[in-house]
Image (cartoon, rainbow, N blue to C red):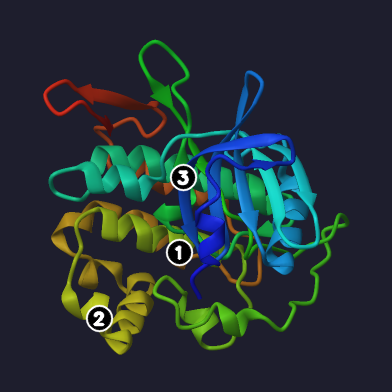
Amino acid sequence: MPCNPALRNMIGKTIAEYQLIQILGYGSYGATYKAKKGDKTICLKISDKLRGYENEWKTMEKLQGIRGVPTMIMHNSNDTIWVIGMSLEGPNLRNFMLRNPTKTFQPTTLHKMLYQLVTILEEIHTRGIVHRDIKFDNVLVSQPQSKESDVFLIICDFGQARQYRNDKGEMIQEPDDDYRLANRFHATPNVDLGEDHGPLDDVRQLSYAVLLASGYNDPKYVNNVTHRNNMKRELFRAPAGVLPECAKWMEYFFVAISENDDIDYPNYEEIKDSILEVLPVTNALAPLRLTLDLESDTWYLF
């Protein structure tokens, strides 16, 4: 369901002492704005849906201190709209991908992204949280961190997240809401079959995002739900037989995921080792970097 149109037309208004100066994006959740108070500039996420707002700020509160999660600055409500203020980061990965003439990322770039994002997911899962909505729209690029324009990735939008383990490490009973997650484009086969979305499903969702970003655009995968679901299952049963040429380099990664059990906590060391091995000529630990194309005055991510 699209967000309330009024939430997309708030530039110039002041919310929680911050003036809204630029809209950054909008969706079913509401809208995000660049906002300013004095010399402080942040991102304000504005929603008229209490449930998602409350879930998101409480989840982010548990995840503070993780480098790949936005810093939460404040949250506020007036019984009409709900606001979360967080660190202002750069565009999302989908935005950067669409800037490229091929609408894809190079394998060497995806290699570094994959390692960073699995590492962030490991930290999120260690704190007992599953994201449940991993896609490139929900991965931001940080502000440049050095004169070389090094950046790092940030997983955002925790409105669908849930706590799956308590502080004692005990499993928490799944709320009966995974039906909302089933049959979405990036849903995993387990969730489509009515199973709980666990940590390994976050990693599977990431694998689908990287597959598409590598250049896989089979119309049957995009448009045919049955074909897409079969493909998703086969990626973890026999990846060598179904991976397209543009993504053959990812085979070890899919094999490593398939060797994990959905009930147990994923073996992240094995998964990260598989990423290091998939492109041995490239260093997955090397920083991602922004590069300015002077002719088009456009920043690209490598």
Q: Which quadrant would the C terminus be assigned to in this image?
A: top left
Contact (CB < 8 A) between labels 1 and 2? no
**Of the pair 52 and 61, the residue shown nearer to us:** 52
The amino acid type of the residue labelled 3 equals Leu
Contact (CB < 8 A) between labels 3 and 1? no
The amino acid type of the residue labelled 1 equals Gln
Q: Element at badge 3?
A: strand
Q: Is residue 105 visible?
A: no
| Earlier sequence position, callout 3 versus callout 2 | 3
**Of the pair 35 and 85, the residue shown nearer to us:** 35
- Please provide percent x and percent y for residue 21: 52, 36
Q: Is residue 265 left or right of residue 22?
A: right
The residue under the point 56% across, 43% down is 120
Q: Residues within 10 Å of mark 2 (few under 14, many from 20)?
A: few
The residue under the point 42% across, 54% down is 137
| Earlier sequence position, callout 3 versus callout 1 | 3
